[in-house]
Amino acid sequence: MSPAPAAQVATGRLATAGLATDRFSSVDALRGLTVAAMLLVNNPGDWSHVYAPLLHAQWHGCAPTDLIFPMFLFIVGVSIALALLPRVERGDASASLTGTVLKRAARIAGLGLLLHLCALWAFDLPHYRIMGVLQRIGLCFAGAGLLALHARARTQWVALAGLLLGYGVLLASGGSYAPLENIASRFDHAVLGVHVYQLDPVTGRGHDPEGLLSTLGALATTLLGLRAGDWLRRGRLRALWIAGAVALLAGYAASYWQPLNKNLWTPSYVLWTGGIACWLLASFHLLIDKRGWPAWGRAFGVNAIAAYAGSALMLYALAAAGWLEPLYRHAFADWMTPRFGPYLPSLAYALAFVAVWWGVVRWLDARRIYFKI
């Protein structure tokens, strides 16, 4: 990772997938608020005492927290559209550009593997986990980036429809959507072995919420973002509103066939969360880009990698030093719990964690330092 040159910032252009692209403040703000929400829900003071809206659905369903990761992948697709599609239209979709996309995807996934190695050491975990958030982002970035470079809009829509239908049929063919028994969990455990997120000591089966097979659904989310990003750069705001409504209705209808499920990233979940993402993108564009509202979250958005990876490393360092639990207990729990109960100090710690990293990214932004991989 390296700071972006000041000259890039001075012209209002930054590297996305190794390319210069005009930025929409609305996209940076939406990305930033998504990263901040990700830090908030991933870092409570006490996992036993978390307010319900900040928890994922136990299995089926879609809680507010379950909107965060698909929102981020949707924005990955939007950013690809803003960076790559203008180059394609100018006839610049060269082999070197393909290499740039694949190299960046590999670096994103590689950073995820490195962070998991740090987590293995910091928390003394029983096994190493191969897949994860950044690994999934890397795979989706590669897939959507290649389609942006080498496929026309119609082909991209066909690929999106094919993923939704094909993956849905594949899930249905497994005969069950239950934890550990569904085809996605069985496939991931067969391929990754013990290197999945969760292993059941009784049955020996495994599951990974960011596994290989369910990445097909995640890629569909990213492709939806790719097409939404093309509408955004062309000023087709009405198309975003209509697409959001259609996707929400289709997702609701599809949930009667296959339930909304983040762990499996079911087609109904893709459509439901994609519809919300389209509406949020349209709203942010209307309010920030067109009406001049403040781009809250922008500092997180332009340094998303620094915030995500840096906060993870800070967490691992605190855990390895044995300071994580004492920090929470002395700074929050000991004096807040007798007065307010155990849930508020847990939330206060998470908010403080986000505030610390808001200060970091604000400091970086003020000095025009932007990290990329």
Image: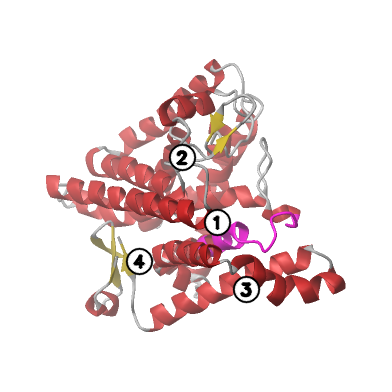
Give the Cα separation between the discs numbered 1 and 2: 18 Å
Which comes sooner in the sequence, label 2 or label 3? Answer: 2
Q: Assess disc 2: are there few (<14), some (14-19) or many (≥20) residues with their C-alpha within 10 Å of its C-alpha.
A: many
Give the Cα separation between the discs numbered 4 and 1: 17 Å
Q: Mark 4 points at which residue?
A: 23
Q: Mark 3 points at which residue?
A: 352
Q: Mark 2 points at which residue?
A: 218
Q: Which amino acid does label 2 sit on?
A: Ala
Query: Label 1 near label 4: C-beta < 8 Å?
Result: no
Q: Assess disc 4: are there few (<14), some (14-19) or many (≥20) residues with their C-alpha within 10 Å of its C-alpha.
A: some
307 horizontally vs 203: left or right = left
Residue at 58% in and 61% down: 37
Helix, strand or loop at disc 1? helix
Badge nearest the viewer, 3 or 1: 3
Of 336 and 264, nearer the camera is 336
On the question of residue 103 being in view, the answer is yes
Which comes sooner in the sequence, label 3 or label 1? Answer: 1
Helix, strand or loop at disc 2? helix
Q: What stretch is highlighted in magenta?
A: 35-51
Which comes sooner in the sequence, label 4 or label 1? Answer: 4
Query: Label 2 near label 4: C-beta < 8 Å?
Result: no
Badge nearest the viewer, 1 or 2: 2
